[in-house]
Image: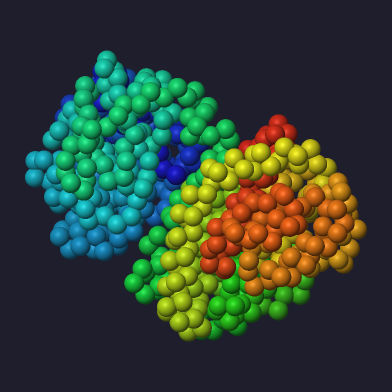
Amino acid sequence: MCGIVGYVGKRRLVPVVLEGLKRLEYRGYDSAGIVYLQDGKLVKFRSEGKLQNLEHIMADAMGAPAHIGLGHTRWATHGAPTTANAHPHSDCTGDLVVVHNGIIENYHSLRKELIEKGHSFASETDTEVLAHLIEEYLDGDLRAAVTQALSRIEGSYAIGVLWTGMPDTLIAARNHSPLVIGVHEEDGGFLASDIPPLLPYTEQIVFLDDQELVVLQANNHTVYSLVTGEVVEKKIETISWNAGMAEKGGYKHFMLKEIYEQPQAIINTVSGRINPENGSVDLPEMNLSDADIAGIERIFLIACGTSWHAALVAKYWIERWAGIPVEVDIASEFRYRTLLIDERVLTVSISQSGETADTLAGIRLAKQLGSKIVTICNVVGSTMTREADGTIYTHAGPEIGVASTKAFTSQLAALFLFTLFLAEKRGSMEAAKRLEFGKELIRLAAVIEKILPALQDEIKELIESYYDSRDFLFVGRGLNFPIAMEGALKLKEISYIHAEGYASGELKHGPIALIDKDMPILALAPQDAVYQKSISNIEEIKARQGRLILIGTEGDQHLKSITDDIIYLPKVLEELNPILYTIPAQLLSYEIASRRGCDVDQPRNLAKSVTVE
Ligand code: AGP
């Protein structure tokens, strides 16, 4: 995600903001910038790549006699990671600058309106729209202008604004994107996307809430509601985190932080893409014409590892609801068979990093054979997004933990949207159903957010009798089979326990020979279309004294007659069980790996992005 740092006070601006941006590097970024006010003028520096590039071009400015300014690290969402797209962005006068974290969903229409009013744009970003919108409303009162501009914005934002007309004031605001204020009676006022940049100077923190704006000066701050315009009294909290903990938002590991970020990641991936009135799905970056879509006779999904599991789930969805035959291939195998691919086949790659060599090789071959390429990816400007004909971005934000969690559930959300999109274009699903499915996907994020804390506590207790196991089986049927494999992959890659995921029905064809009183088996058994069959398979395991952990639907008393170790989950739209049932599997692998003292975020032998074949 992008990172914002701002400061106003006695200290020299550049060292405070530069050091603050370095403490936000864990959030991931691909360009950076700093702006400060000196002698009544705004001085702006921006660069692509890492902060050392910015430091290099600012070498002579380190000691600048400036005491108010803003800094930003950009994680590209709209527009490639170039200097021109790096923040801060200015209005037409150059006397006002903005830094922003989030997604302005209606920036196209606002940009068009502002150009018609004579504004000229210097970047491809959604953020620059905000600078010109504030300029449009600015009439001496910056807070009023920012308030009016934000009332036009649809989407998420955390912003910082600086204007030469108010040389001692920063204005900041947030909606669905984090922003914290640091206060110190001597040193002045600080603002940042997260706590780490503030820790060297103060532990006195004010957490802004959604739809709140702060007027920040060296020796005071006033918070206003963007809804009522009234002053909001905010509590000053004292934070006792150390810097290491703060980077992880107080979580012990990035993986755990990212597990908890999944509801927001799903919302960010879905928002602005489903019309809440009619369920219509809008995926403009996919670059597929109606004719392209009508001409699709088959879809190939190619991916590796966790992303391959997402592809396996999508096969069920697309075939059922869009009526298009789907083949799924592990990308590293895809090339070694006779591929009957031509322009009638759409090839979709799924990749968090967009740099996986096996998947890149796959799409290059498919393209040579005449197939159009769409990629589902989490990294703007990555190789895969530049080589594909179109992209569906997941907006999960950077995933630091090697074991993929929020990127995976965001991939599933994006693939579900893709299914609804295809169904709409192919007329294979009536609008009411699509609308229901879209609403259920959005509701799912809230369900996950609600159950996470108690679910983690329950699983933390449960694993005490399983964490020292040598082997583990995960089983699921239908839509849950890929999630059984995903759970097994999570466990093996971070706890180093040998784990295998199987289709429940496959156990009797061999793997059941493994089952005895020492073999733990996690079985996914929601009350879905294949529930009875799943229960039969589970009874086969019980008959052989397998140590069963069941994950099922709240209220299903029958499960208690099978085993004591049951995790109950809320009932959601059956099609969305794969997303929901992934969560306990992630938490189980996380808690077991933590209990075994493993390096959860950086497991042995693994890389976050496998750029070799
Ligand atoms: C998932 O937890 C693993 N880190 C790994 O299987 C990963 O999913 C795989 O390497 C694919 O990576 P990609 O999504 O970046 O292409």
Relative to 458, say whether 571 is above or below. Answer: below
Judged from this view, the residue extending furthest toward the left is 139
Task: Please identify the quarter of the rendering in which residue 97 is found.
Answer: top left
Q: Quadrant of residue 21?
A: top left
- Evaluate whether residue 432 shows in this view: yes
Nearest the camera: 382 or 539? 539
- Residue located 67% across and 77% down the image: 341
Q: Point out the residue furthest to the right here.
A: 513
Residue 459 in percent (x, y) is at: 64, 43
Q: Residue at x 71, y 49 (%)?
A: 565
> Where does residue 26 sit, x and y in percent of width and height?
50, 36
Is 169 above or below relative to 301?
A: above
On screen, residue 552 versus residue 547, left or right, reads left
Question: For this view, does 258 lie left or right of residue 229?
Answer: right
Residue 64 visible in rendering: no
Q: How is the image coloured?
A: rainbow
Residue found 57% across the figure and 68% down from its top = 575
- Image height of 211 relative to 373, above or below: above
544 or 573: which is nearer to us?
544
Residue at horizontal 28%, vertical 50%? 128
Where residue 102 appears, as percent x and y from the top left, is 37, 49
Q: Position of residue 174 (x, y in %)?
A: 31, 43
* Quarter of the image where one finds residue 607: top right
Extreme residue in the top direction: 186
